[in-house]
Image (cartoon, rainbow, N blue to C red):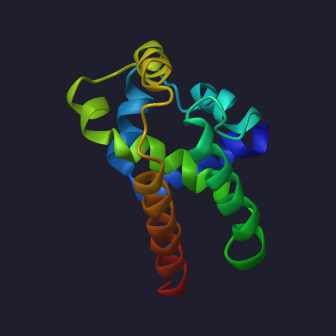
Amino acid sequence: MDMHFANMRSLIQILDSEMYDLMDSNGDYTHFYFCYRWFLLDFKRELVYDDVFATWEVIWAAKHIASGHFVLFLALALLETYRDIILSNSMDFTDVIKFFNEMAERHNAQAVLQLARSLALQLQMIIENK
């Protein structure tokens, strides 16, 4: 689990430095403990029942064709989906936890999965161009 948190920190530093700076300056919640439930339960509480299975299938398939760490891109996609809300309200750790607790089972799973795929491709392009 600690490795997930460390990798999330690195991913967000690379792919969204503005969000990282907010997290770092607003009570330093770059430990990403608000993602704990997401990783522990593989997004089971975040999505409606049918979307959970589709998401799990994507995670399992991604291990074979894209990344064994696709779950990190899903977590980042959830954050990025609500990026403007988080930034415009300068949310701190408690606000983020509360926000995602209130949003449980209200996410557009297909949009989050698509964004996760885009983020994985974006990181791949950054790595290939260096």
Q: Position of residue 1 (x, y in %)?
A: 79, 38
Between 127 and 52, the residue placed more toward the observer is: 52
Farthest residue to the front: give it: 50
At 60% from the left and 44% from the top, the residue drawn is 50
Between 55 and 129, the residue placed more toward the observer is: 55
Is the residue 32 above or below the residue 52 in the image? above
Quadrant for residue 69, please give it.
bottom right
At 71% from the left and 79% from the top, the residue drawn is 65
Q: Position of residue 109 (x, y in %)?
A: 48, 48
| Number of residue marks | 0
Between 108 and 129, the residue placed more toward the observer is: 108
Q: Position of residue 58 (x, y in %)?
A: 65, 62
At 40% from the left and 55% from the top, the residue drawn is 111
Quadrant for residue 95, please give it.
top left
Farthest residue to the left: give it: 88
Between 14 and 120, the residue placed more toward the observer is: 120
At 62% from the left and 53% from the top, the residue drawn is 55
Q: Position of residue 23 (x, y in %)?
A: 42, 31
Is the residue 9 above or below the residue 119 in the image? above
